[in-house]
Amino acid sequence: MNIREGMLQLLKEAGDNFISGEEISKRLGVSRTAIWKHIEELREEGYVFEAVRRSGYRLLATPDVTSAEEIKLGLTTKTFGCAVHHFAVVDSTQNKCQDLAKQGAPEGTLVVADQQIGGKGRLGRVWYSPAGKNISMSLLLRPTLELQECPQITLLAAVAIVETMRDICGVEASIKWPNDILVNGKKVCGILTELNAEAERINWLIIGMGINVNTLEEDFPPEILEIATSLAIEKKRQFRRAEIIQGILKRLEELYLLYIDEGFAPIKKRWELYAVTIGKRVTIRTLHGSLTGYAEGIDETGVLLVRRDNGSLNKVYSADVEIHA
Ligand code: BTN
């Protein structure tokens, strides 16, 4: 734990009470001057402190930041978020996470950015990630899985995000296969899973999650506004992004451990609870063409099963799905 993390922890633990500079300096083993410097630095980042002579400091307000400290303080996971790398601006958190994975970073390493200037979406699309509003993060996993089982992890991530949105934000979200998270029919979150493998062996897998949190209508480019929404638009209030990230890491880890223990079946059951694609007439578009039919369900590996009007059953691995009314 670094000094800033230690200070914030002590101040948060103290709650409404003051904690003296002397106490902080004793507990952290650093000088009073160092503490004062960090307090000033934190103030510039938006933290509000009350400082009273002879009583010390009290934390009055925490800004909506996604710094490593804010994510790690109060995080109760075992390994997810064990290392948090925060950037103000990156091209894509996926690329940063990839670099860390190559250098041997452990499972659970998280990369978070306040803004992405080259955010990547599925199927080669661009992902809109403006500064200071949304969650853009990538989590590194090193599972022992067969290559064809990897899509299951994306479905698992979608379940974790839907359940976190419900529990922390009070938002009823649903999943459009494979992993678009929708609220009132508009996209609030996208998931991009990238992997690195040799022959049939997976070296690592990176789950990239982009969540529209505090973006308002006027922040979205007009062409996106028609199909996208945010938690703030839906609930008419702003959210603390660090709290949502902590919730997702916690739920993701629980589901991941369940998946390792019991396989895909319990995850599939939960995914089906939230899915809006199943039981609907759909049009599937891939690079190779399109097909229309009835979405019967997903199979044991997470593949979408579509029954065409001629009776044939098609397996869909990756595509854009249009749901008919
Ligand atoms: C989609 O097309 O629906 C997937 C979008 C995934 C966006 C996230 S934001 C964090 C991570 N970094 C990226 O460049 N993309 C993913």
Image: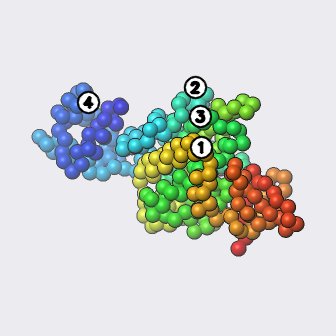
Mark 3 / mark 1, whichever is N-terminal = 3
The amino acid at mark 4 is Leu
Q: Please state the horizontal and vertical placement of residue 19, each as a whole percent of the image.
A: 19, 41
User: Residue 28 — which label?
Assistant: 4
Q: CA distance from mark 1 to mark 2?
A: 18 Å
The local secondary structure at tag 2 comes to loop
Mark 1 / mark 2, whichever is N-terminal = 2
Q: CA distance from mark 3 to mark 1?
A: 11 Å
Q: Please state the horizontal and vertical placement of residue 93, each as a whole percent of the image.
A: 57, 40
Q: Which residue is mark 3?
A: 142
Q: Which residue is mark 1?
A: 207
Q: Is residue 50 visible?
A: no
The local secondary structure at tag 4 comes to helix
Q: CA distance from mark 4 to mark 2?
A: 31 Å
Q: Around disc 1, counting alpha carbons within 10 Å, would you say few (fewer than 14), some (14 to 19), or many (20 or more)?
A: many
* Residue at x-position 44% and y-position 38%: 78
Q: CA distance from mark 4 to mark 3?
A: 34 Å
Mark 2 / mark 3, whichever is N-terminal = 2
**Along the viewing direction, whichever of 259 and 22 lies nearer the viewer:** 259
Farthest right residue?
310
Q: Is residue 102 visible?
A: yes
Q: From the Cβ of disc 2, is ligand 1 less than 8 Å away?
A: no
The amino acid at mark 1 is Ile
Q: Which residue is mark 2?
A: 103
Q: CA distance from mark 2 to mark 3?
A: 13 Å
Tag nearer the camera, 4 or 3: 3
The amino acid at mark 3 is Arg
**Along the viewing direction, whichever of 277 and 3 lies nearer the viewer:** 277
Q: Please state the horizontal and vertical placement of residue 33, each as a whole percent of the image.
A: 23, 30
Tag nearer the camera, 3 or 1: 3
User: Residue 164 — which label?
Assistant: none
